[in-house]
Image (cartoon, rainbow, N blue to C red):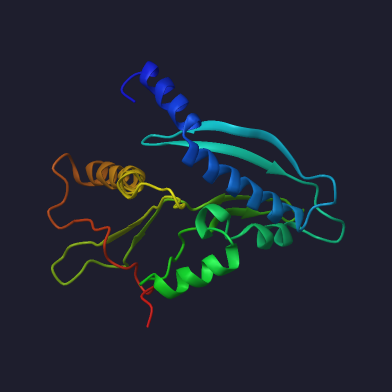
Amino acid sequence: GNHPEEDLALERELLADPKERAEHIMLVDLGRNDVGRVATPGTVDLPGVMQIERYSHVMHISSTVTGVLRPGLDAWDALRAALPVGTISGAPKIRAMQIIDEIEPARRGPYGGGIGYAGLEGEMDIALALRTIVVGPEPGPDGRWLYHLQAAGGIVADSDPDAEFEETVNKAAALARAIELAETAFCGPQGPETISGSAGASPPDTVKP
């Protein structure tokens, strides 16, 4: 919003939206199932439910699912159980991933994966790559750089196509802003004449045969 009062109004509107609530509850249930695959029975918990997280261009409903890892399993088992998360794959997860592979013209590359670290003591901290930019190793024949921006929204039966498209554009806008700031920092206020961006091309080396 343009001011704190508008932010609060948008927050209340988001939490009261039946479509957003239904989508979130479905994904929380999917997350609980994923955690339950590697957690000690009876330890799966929801310490935070239907909370609002604010970012530069969007707001999200957020819930936290936790569990105690079963004896004999490690952080890699937990990661395998979690990825790809339901917010990226959809549900039911296996069939949704099959459909994604069938209809999407380009590989997702880093989008939807995890970025973080794994320590020698077994600890792991991974963040989901929900907004990504893939840049080619060198500019094209015309001297222009091509950026592949990746962002998306969750689709359910009663989704409004226009609203979902607007949400996706708002998410990608933060990435475009990062490019603008980088151009200004390295090339001055006018930016480079040879740099341009695109959200429509496939990321390098990810086009399906």
Q: Point out the residue furthest to the bottom here.
A: 209
15 versus 163 height, above or below: above
Q: Name the residue rendered at 85%, 46% in the picture.
A: 42
Left of 127 or right of it: where is 43?
Answer: right
Residue 86, x across and y down, in percent? 57, 55
- Residue lying at the far front in this picture: please name it: 158
**15 or 152, nearer to the observer:** 15
**Quarter occupied by residue 70:** bottom right
Q: Is residue 98 left or right of residue 137?
A: right
Residue at the image point whose x is 54% and y is 43% from the top: 22
Q: Position of residue 148 (x, y in %)?
A: 31, 60
Q: Is residue 192 left or right of residue 51?
A: left
131, above or below 18, in the image: below
Residue 160: image x %, image y %? Answer: 36, 46
User: Considering depth in this image, is 63 or 145 the residue closer to the camera?
Assistant: 63
Q: Nearer the viewer, residue 41 or 77?
A: 41
Q: Residue furthest right?
A: 71
Q: How many marks?
A: 0
Residue shown at 23%/61% (left/top)? 145
Q: Residue at x 22, y 42 (%)?
A: 184
Q: Quadrant of residue 25?
A: top right
The quadrant of the rendering that contains the N terminus is top left
The x and y percentages for residue 94 are 59, 68
Position of the C terminus, as image quadrant, is bottom left
